[in-house]
Image (tube, rainbow, N blue to C red):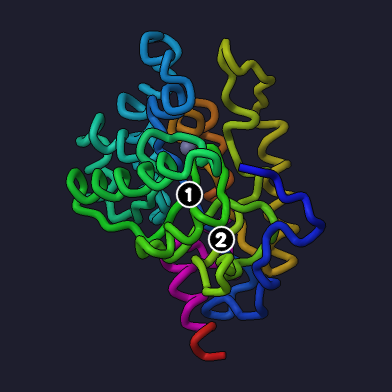
Amino acid sequence: MTHDLTPRPLNPAPPAPDFAWPGGKKSAVFIGFDVDAETAWIGNTPANVNRMVTTSHGGYDARVGIAKILDLMADLSLKGTFFIPGWTAEAHPAACEAIVAAGHEIGHHGYLHKLPDRDRLDEAYDEIDRGLAALKARLGVVPVGYRAPSGENFPELLAHLTARGLRYSSSFRDDIRPYRHLLADGRPGPVEIPVNYAFDDWNFGMTARTSPRSIFGRDMILPLWRDEFAATHDWGGVTTMVLHPQVSGRPMRWHILRDFLTEVAAREDVWIATGAEITAHYEACEAAR
Ligand SMILES: [Zn+2]
């Protein structure tokens, strides 16, 4: 693929429209979990399939992390969205069925967590279609939401998501309020519920031999989350969390997450909603305009 570097907005979507959150709430919180399991380690690096300790980071999901996260959400009476790669649903059906049984939304997160690459369109489409088939076959779910594995997207993929009935995406970093994508041919694309990178627990809670980084504890993370949430709330945005059971299902991180969500859930002026609920609200406001 050649690289068209012509100056232009690289995301052609119009600005996020003005609309009110339901019930007079001032902002929204979208609790999203990416249930990567081992796919985070083998999807883009297949040689890791022969490295049991490396992949055991992801194995934590089914052994411990998912159950602990489900306990936490049940304790706080919260519903979230769990983005599950098709491979995870096939490898760990019992752990994934428990997420469905608890009443959470299931979202699409690729099949083997391969980074969507515009130079490999067939592979990118295949990840979508195999992921859809696996979620349907193993969990009986037809997802309406998509979060890109490794957080990448491009025009042909947005069109493919639209063709497959995906109504929203939650990957882009370019806004604090939902907006609707514009496809390259001028048709409307999915609603985007943009993510807030300050709430991606992988950045400060995961370290491994092949991706060493500093990890941070409560004294760093809780103030960061409180401040970022308070400012997003003040601006009437959506606080979109990008959490992973293999990170936030760890003992210390689980407690940080519990304390943050307890504070947010205690507020009267915040709408805690799943991606599907936020999308349905956006669509209703759009239809009324
Ligand atoms: Zn992921």
44, 104: nearer the viewer: 44
Q: Position of residue 196 (x, y in %)?
A: 65, 50
193, 260: nearer the viewer: 193
- 208 up-or-down from 134: above or below: above
Q: What's the amino acid at mark 1? A: Arg
Q: Magenta stretch: give its range.
A: 264-285
Q: Position of residue 282 (x, y in %)?
A: 52, 75
Residue 176 lies in the magenta-colored region: no
Q: What's the amino acid at mark 2? A: Ile
- 104 up-or-down from 235: above or below: above
- Whether the residue under disc 1 has CB within 8 Å of ligand 1: yes
Q: Position of residue 183 (x, y in %)?
A: 56, 66
Separation of disc 2 and disc 1 at Cα? 10 Å
Residue 193: mark:
2
Q: Which residue is mark 1?
A: 147
Local crowd at mark 2 within 10 Å, few (<14), some, or many (≥20)? many
